[in-house]
Amino acid sequence: MTEEIRLQDVVEMRKPHPCGSKEWTVTRIGADIKLRCLKCGRVVMLDRVDFLRRRKRVLLQGPDAPEVSLGLSPRPADEGEQSDT
């Protein structure tokens, strides 16, 4: 299991939420990880260690690398996008 966390990852947790779903979307990363339940929409925050321990697997990886999600490197420009210069 990789320790990499990306924004918009869809992850399966080990235990189900009371609504019955085990699938969550990562909506914020940092010291704490913010998750939204895909079934009922409930939002929870877990510290990074708890999240990594409770996560079972990544079902769908987010589109941006973690460095881009955290703002450490610039977002790559889309090919169809034009600059303002």
Image (tube, rainbow, N blue to C red):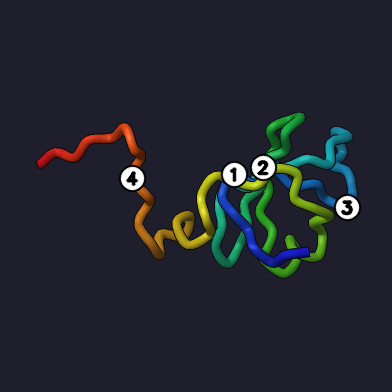
Q: What whole-number distance in Å separates the C-alpha atoms at marks 1 and 3?
A: 19 Å
For mark 4, does the 10 Å Cα neighbourhood hold few (<14), some (14 to 19), or many (20 or more) residues? few
Which quadrant of the figure has residue 24?
top right
Circles 1 and 3: CB distance less than 8 Å?
no
Circles 2 and 1: CB distance less than 8 Å?
yes
* Vertical placement of residue 44 versus 49, above or below: above
Q: Mark 4 points at which residue?
A: 77
Which quadrant of the figure has residue 36?
top right
For mark 3, does the 10 Å Cα neighbourhood hold few (<14), some (14 to 19), or many (20 or more) residues? few
Q: Which amino acid lies under the numbered mark 3 shown in the image of this protein?
A: Arg
For mark 2, does the 10 Å Cα neighbourhood hold few (<14), some (14 to 19), or many (20 or more) residues? many
Query: Outermost residue, front direction?
Result: 79
Residue 29 in the image, given as x and y percentages of width and height: 56, 57
Q: Tell us which disc is closer to us: 4 or 1.
A: 4
- Circle number at residue 14: 3
Q: Mark 1 points at which residue?
A: 8
For mark 1, does the 10 Å Cα neighbourhood hold few (<14), some (14 to 19), or many (20 or more) residues? many
**Circle nearer the N terminus (4, 2):** 2
Identify the element where label 1 is drawn: loop
**Circle nearer the N terminus (2, 1):** 1
**Circle nearer the N terminus (4, 1):** 1
Q: Which amino acid lies under the numbered mark 2 shown in the image of this protein?
A: Thr
Circles 2 and 3: CB distance less than 8 Å?
no
Q: What whole-number distance in Å separates the C-alpha atoms at marks 4 and 1?
A: 19 Å
**Circle nearer the N terminus (1, 3):** 1
Residue 65 in the image, given as x and y percentages of width and height: 52, 56
Query: Outermost residue, left direction?
Result: 85
Q: Name the residue under label 2.
A: 25
